[in-house]
Every structure is written in C-alpha cells, then in structure tokens.
Image (cartoon, coloured by chain):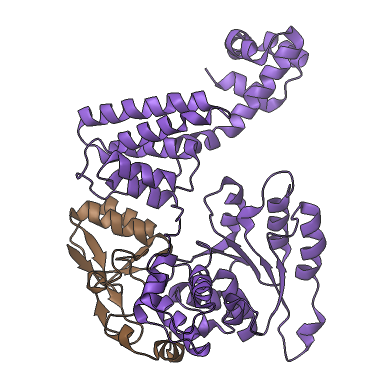
Amino acid sequence: MDNLMWVEKYRPKTVAEVIGNEDAKASFTNWLIKKRREKAVLLYGPAGIGKSTLVYAAAHDFKYNVVEMNASDIRTRKAIMKMAAPAVSLSSLDEFSFETKGNLLLLDEVDGIFGQQDRGGVGAIVKIIQNSRIPIILTANNIEIQKLRPLKKICHLIRFRRVRIPLIVAFLRRICQAENIPAEKEALEILAQNSLGDVRSAINDLQTFCESRKILRKDDVQFIPLRNRGFNIYDTLKGMFSANSSVEAMKILNNSLIDYDTLLLSIHDNLPLHYKNPEKLAIAYEALSKADVFRGRIQNEEWRLLKYVFEFLSQSTTIAPGEFQPFNFIFPPTKRYLLMRTSAERTLLKTICTRIGAKCHVSQKTANSEYLPFLKIIFRKKSDQASQLAKWLRLDNSSINYLKKTN
Amino acid sequence: MRTLKKQGFKLPYLGKEIFIKLTRMGLDYEQGIFLIRDLNNIENIRDFLSEILNEKTVFTQICLICRKDFLCTECKHYSECPTKDLPLPCICEKCSQKNNLYEQYLKLDK
C-alpha cells in the first residue's frame, strides 16, 4: 500500500469527496439520477481536475458498473462497436440485482480520437449514443476540435474548471495528515499555486517533495520550477490583446495550445474589435499580413521562420499597449464558418468540374475558369442545348439546378 | 469596478439587442433580476458586461464554509488564481485558516 501513488491512494471514492467544480458536480449527478433528456453527457475541461474521478465516484454512489474505454485503447469504429455496442444495448444481469443499477459507459479523452489509428471512432460513438439504453459519459480536454462537433450536438455539455487554490491546499493538508508528515501551510500553498488548479499534479508534486522528508517546509518547495501552462483560445486571445508589450504577447503565444492557422484567423477577426482607431488597425493588419506571409513560407518544413510569425503576430496585437478594453472574442474564425456553410456547394462544383475535365481533357481549374461560365449561360438561356450537354456530361438534377441558378 | 452577485443582479436598460444577446449567452431574466442559467460561458458574459457597461465587472464569491460573500481581490492567491472574478464557490481567507477544512468541506450540503 505504501508504494501506491498518492493520486491513486487518495482518489475520492464518493462525489462529496471530489473537490471543486460544485456546479458541474451537481449538474452531472442531476443528469445521472433524473430522467435524462440527452442520452450522453460530455464533461470537458483541463486535465487533472476530476472529470474521470467524478464519474467513478458517482458510479460508486449510485451503484453503477463502469465500462471504460480510454486513450490507451485503440478506438477504431470496429473496436468501439465490438466493445461498447453490447454494453449499451443489452441489459446487464446486474440490473436484476439490488446491489447495482447496471452499466455506465465511460469514454475517456474522446478528443484524442484522431487520424488513421482511430478512423471512424467519432461516428461509431454517435451511433452508440443514439441506440443506447444506459448512461454514456464522455470526457475531453478540448472540445473546440472540429471532429467533436457531432458529439457536441447530441450530448449534454458540462464544463469543468481548474480547482481553486484554497481547496487544493485543504486537500493537500489532509493528505499530509494522513501520511503523518507535518507540512508548513506556506509550502502547501506554493505547491497549490504552482499546480494552476490541476489537483493531480499538485498531489504528484507533494509526493515527490515528501519522499525521504519527515517534515515539509516552505524552503523545500520555494524553488519549484513553474509548470508550463497551455493556454486555450480564450486565454491566448485575452492574454495577447491585453499584453503590454510584444515580448509579453510572445510568451503567451509560446504557451498557446492553439494551432497557428486558427490563431492567425482568430486575430484577424478580432482586430477590429480591439482597435477603434483606423490608423492603428491598419498598422495591426500590416503586421498580421507579414505574419501570414511567413506562415505561408514555412509550409511544413521551414520551421526556423516561425519566430518571425510569432514576432509579427505579437506586434499586431500590441500596437496600442495599455488601451485594452475587454470585449467578446469572435471564435471560431468566421472563415471556417463560411467554408462550412458553402461546403455542399463546393463539393457540387468540384463534381461538375471533374465531369467537364474528363470529357474535355482539361484540368478542374481550367474547367472552372474557362468552361463553367459559358455552361451557366447555356443552362440559363438555351434549355434544349442544356439538356443535351447534361446528358453528355452525365450531370444529375442537383448539378443542373446549380448551373441554372448561379450566375 | 462593478460588482455583481451570483444569486442575481440588476442592470440598467441596455436595449433589446443586448438583452437578447445576454439571454443567448446564458442569462435568465425574472422580475427585473438577471440570473445565471449557464456557467459554461461565464467568462464571456463577464467580459461582455464589462464592454457594455464600460467598466470592469466582477462577480462576488460565496464561501463554501461560512456562506458569506467576498471579493476575489481580498484573497492572497488573487494573482495566481486561474478562475478569478468568476462566480464559482471558493473558501474565504478567514475560513481557509481552519485546520480541519477538508473535513468541514465533506460535511457541507453542496
């Protein structure tokens, strides 16, 4: 028992023992015990703040068996269907027992379902949720990922936040009491502050410092290196726009979890809200355009140019330091919305251009720029020629309607 | 600086558009009082209120132990707190001096 990690040893067993996020806890337990409008719940927030722990604690309190699939499992469509589908559709024998209410499916870290390895995973989860007869709980650190949009639509969303420092201090003190290690309050406060609201890392730090010590003093932990904190989009934008110098903005950029292209688009959208003065706005856009040029030159190879992207991005948000007025950030980028809205139309256009290209032996690009404008006129004005062309190109009704209606 | 209570707060008349936006962001309105319906978006609500009221807007904190209201600025962890000025339960400076804090926390009817 002594060799156990303290994170495991002191893992809360009941919902009451989970510290912080009181509103999220109440919302989750309400969802679990009352009639559920949504079949699944998505708990999201930074790592180490008690999302999975709460699920296990609630399962203990309300007598559910947890069937878990976590990030270490391969989560392809086939694997998910094989493991989870029977669990959610068949009644468990346990349901007939007084001791348990049956199964509860926990899909941990669903934002980690990516790429070739987990192909079709999100689609399989959506299908399972739709056919489920048992509660399904998903957890994620970041739900702004495009791939999770189908899940967000069908789940009840509950946000978890970093746990507040006084609560972490209280929990660390209780661990020290249980381990019979006297600890100075200041030492525990330093550990809690350094954890940035991540209870798991605070406990790990405490265990590290308590190894081979009979008493924990402030001096022991005073020079603990600062934990790198990854900023989400909200913190990144707020930090960059409120920074007093480009160096300060650059520090935030260095710790941001957001990919460079999304960040570039987001800054582009939010600049007019930040700078009311047109001259300053023009200077900011000038810097942003230079950042965009360097981002283009990097492509996937020239990463040595990244420092120039950072330099110009941080310049664009700090043209007028000290003049920051809080505003409501625009996110996700409007360009992405536009692309999403026109996705069906672009697919249709691509199909038409492919057909023209195949028949006329030209590229899709040439078909689009040199053939399509004339086809549109023919389809609008010469219906008999249009029907012959449609037959020759094998165009379906939606393509014909598109050519008739667009200019 | 304008201080708002989590339990409900009043705002001056700000127009129909802003009212609609606030309700969409997660506020409810009952008998002249704005109530927080959805905490998921509370940072944006706070920043939007700061923007439209043209002054820094903060929410008061409720101590989990003594149930009293207090401000984040009174706390010594203010600069390090990752969720400062948001209406989330916390522990006030006075209560955090207590030795058996975790035991008291467990006994709470949260």
| Residue A266 found in image quarter | top left
Residue A98 in percent (x, y) is at 73, 92
- In the picture, measured across the screen, residue A81 lies left or right of residue A123, that is right
Residue A42 in percent (x, y) is at 57, 63
| Residue B11 found in image quarter | bottom left
> Which quarter of the rendering shows the N terminus of chain A?
bottom right
Q: Residue at x 44, y 66 (%)?
A: A195
Q: Is residue B65 visible?
A: yes
Q: Which hue is chain A drawn in?
A: purple
Q: Residue at x 54, y 79 (%)?
A: A212
Q: Residue at x 67, y 17 (%)?
A: A353
| Residue A277 found in image quarter | top left
Q: Residue at x 77, y 64 (%)?
A: A84
Q: Is residue B90 visible?
A: no
In the displayed structure, A407 sits above or below A312; it is above
Residue B91 in percent (x, y) is at 33, 80
Of residues A16 and A302, the one drawn nearer to the viewer in this rendering: A302
Of residues B24 and B66, the one drawn nearer to the viewer in this rendering: B66
Q: Which chain is brown?
A: B
